[in-house]
Image (spheres, rainbow, N blue to C red):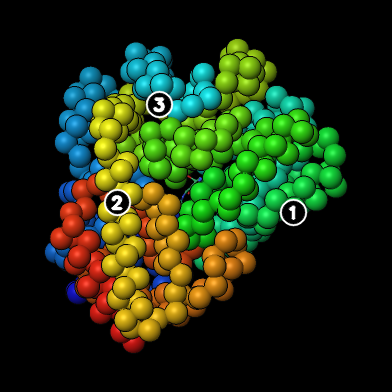
Amino acid sequence: MIYKRSSALFAEAEKVIPGGVNSPVRAFKGVGGTPIFVKEAKGAYLYDEDGNRLIDYINSWGPMILGHAHESVVNAVIEKAQKGTSFGMPTEIETKIAELAVSMVPNIDKIRFVNSGTEACMSAVRLARGFTGKDKIIKFSGCYHGHSDSFLIQAGSGASTFGTPNSPGVTKGTAKDTLLARYNDLDHVKQLIDANKNEIACIIIEPVAGNMGCIPPKKDFLEGMRALCDAHDILLVFDEVMTGFRLAKGGAQELYNINADIVCFGKVIGGGLPVGAFAARNEIMNHLAPLGPVYQAGTLSGNPLAMAAGLAMLTELNNDDKVFDRLAEKTAYLHAGMAKVLDENNVVYTINRVGSMISVHFDDSDVVDFESAAKGNNDKFKAFFHGMLNQGIYIAPSAFETWFITDALSYEDLDFTIEAVNQASKDL
Ligand code: KE4
């Protein structure tokens, strides 16, 4: 594959944008080489600035669950844009997407739209603190809830890649209110609760972790967390920025039949435009300004173009009773095909999969938390990443990420990918 134009564009970008990118994980620091500049995309395919076609397994880190430039999403945005792009005033379409989201997701009465997953999670924690009157939160090592100060304490995703788990600029005053637990370790959560009696406002968790690779909750882990929260007057916050509207219509709450107190969304809910959201039952949401004392705001929150894209996306997902099964079946097919060729090539690996989230770890231990995820052989991952890229397959440029399957993938695409895995893993 030739990346001449991407390299030239990257050199230009580096002169005016820190690291040449607007989000660190795009910079390929975790895998080396220079980032690919995309010219356009359609369905399952990216077309880069050098004319290469790549099968996309990142899909903008989750939003493109139905494939790039989906007709109903694009048409909705075009139609809306011709009527104005932002008003800073209420519009009917915000109510329409709110009503649809509330009808699809269990245990929520109201939803507030913001502009990113970070804003959603940051606001959810503030709401939990305001509702309970308590300051501390529990998060899990390796989970990533965006770049708000309270979360950059051994965060997953890009922060892990950069090896700077506690980012400079986060004050000690902030860090002291964030307690870190081991994912899938209920005893550790219990210990933290007992050591901080009546001080913990919420536990925030990715119900299926996606920022240290894909890590499913162990049996009874989420149930145990729900019980602990009930026993200690702690709110359970599901960060469903990745899992929301991806694992099922009702996300991880539906898939695992667990009731969270506050649910955060991003990615799919915006259909590729900047949308985040957080939602809960009335008792909690009615604490939010202008109804209640917990302040949260945003100039472009509920932006009409973003709402049009999100409404089109959620409508497509809500009206297709088979889409989540198709996504899971395609991911299972990919899993089985990759496992077969990796076994044939005598590669040491673990594959984790939940629904249309999947990740490959080059280590033979079970990957159940940040510590076991970090054991993965990063040199092998780098070689695998570039081996796949050179065959026209774009996977996450970091071992601490999940692949996101899109329904636009055909079984021919999957077979092509499996053969690429075969070729890329021959010398691992
Ligand atoms: P954003 O602020 O990036 O929209 O969402 C933050 C966020 C919150 N919660 C979860 C579970 C997330 O995965 C994310 C963002 N995910 C990363 C990829 N792992 C976004 C990619 C990036 O940082 O460029």
Q: Residues within 10 Å of mark 1 (few under 14, many from 20)?
A: some
The local crowd at label 3, few if under 14, some if 14 to 19, many if 20 or more residues have their Cα within 10 Å, is: some
| Mark 3 vs mark 2, CA separation in Å | 22 Å
Q: Which residue is mark 2?
A: 329
Seen as rendered, the residue at the extreme bottom is 427
Cα separation, mark 3 vs mark 1, equals: 33 Å
- Report helix, strand or loop for mark 2: helix
Query: Are the residues flagged by discs 3 and 2 in contact, CB closer than 8 Å?
Result: no
Describe the element under mark 3 as helix, strand or loop. helix
What residue is disc 1 on?
A: 188
Pair 3/2: label in front: 2
Mark closest to the chain's N terminus, 3 or 1: 3
Is 421 situated above or below 104? Answer: below
- The residues tagged by marks 2 and 1 sit, at their Cα atoms, a distance apart of 35 Å
Q: Are marks 3 and 1 in contact (CB under 8 Å)?
A: no
Residue marked by disc 3: 104
Going 85% across and 47% down the picture, which residue do you hit?
Answer: 195
Does the image show residue 104?
yes
Decide: is 382 above or below 303: below
Earlier sequence position, callout 2 versus callout 1: 1
Q: Is disc 1 placed on a helix, strand or loop?
A: helix
Camera-side residue of 30 and 191: 191
